[in-house]
Amino acid sequence: MKSSHLLFALLSLSTLSAFAQEKSLNLYSARHYQTDEALYANFTRQTGIMINRIEAKEDELLERIRNEGANSPADIFLTVDAARLAKADELGLFAPVKSKVLEERIPANLRSPNWFAFSTRARVIVANKELVKTEDVQNYEDLAKPALKGKVCSRSGSHPYNISLMASLISHIGEAKAEEWARGVVANFARTPKGGDTDQIRAVAAGECGVAISNSYYLARLLRSSKPADKKVMANVVIVWPNQKGVGTHINVSGGGMLKTAPHKDSAVKFLEYLASDDAQRYFADGNNEWPAVASVKIMNPALDTMGRFKSDSLDVATLAKNAAAAQRTYDRAGWK
Ligand code: FE
């Protein structure tokens, strides 16, 4: 081969590999739903960008990105809950993304300069109607009333879902009143906090407690289940949308952002914009029985339809994020372990 030909061949090779690199995206995701396969395949079909995906638990992924530091191959971090997104942001992991598409599609209360929510879930009250009157548990505030002594079950106060709920209460009623509320709830505990939201739902159904708080998608999952045990659980509980006469039910999000060290920034922004598209919104939200962040997107989910419509708190997720540290301190002071 003549030297000029060799040079040409080498150049083509390096251009090719640069192209191959640009045409890929490294995704660190705490999501693991069957519909996600279609969600990602659709993106590759539309853009030609291959997705390399690493799935693990939320906190593990965050730890991994921190340990990889400047050499992290991660372009995008997807996770659940504003408190976790806030943690990643506080650690300086996200890069700001300016995108007209995202600004137009994602409502302002569901995004921050560095990350975006792509679906919403509600934190609802679940009650056993044999043990409590549903009219007595219409608001989060009601769970602190002495009448519910020995009837409230909860997961840990350190869990992001409860941190974000507390963050919203702090925003609405102030830290002192929020702490008083937490003390009242702790005084009403039927047992020491343990387990996840589904465990609380099961405990309510079994009559071990009269009332608990859960994210909406756990209830939707049980509603869609064909297992007789799950059907029995749902037959024994009532779902209450809290604070309908006030600020509305606390909602949280699942979302993500581009990492500061992202090797493929163009692909990363394209991917975030894709997640806000109609098709992607449907896959993204429905995969976990959530609601699309883009309000105009319609979904068909029988469980969510059964649960009905509700008024949601319009507090912005950035405020939830900002109050997360104060929320943890408030639970600590109130003894909500
Ligand atoms: Fe969850």
Image: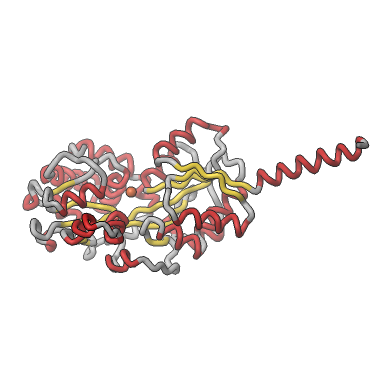
**At which x and y percent is residue 45?**
60, 58
Residue that lies at the very extreme toward the right in this rendered image:
2
Regarding residue 48, the answer to whether it shows in the image is yes
Quadrant of the snapshot with the N terminus: top right
The residue drawn where x is 29% and y is 65% is 311
Work out whether 77 lies above or below 297. Answer: above
Regarding residue 109, the answer to whether it shows in the image is no
Residue sitting nearer the eye, 18 or 313:
18
Q: Is residue 284 left or right of residue 205?
A: right
- Which color scheme did the rendering employ for the protein? secondary structure
The image quadrant that residue 223 belongs to is bottom left
**At which x and y percent is residue 54?**
49, 42
**At which x and y percent is residue 176?**
20, 44
**At which x and y percent is residue 73?**
57, 38
Quadrant of the snapshot with the C terminus: top left
The residue drawn where x is 11% and y is 46% is 188
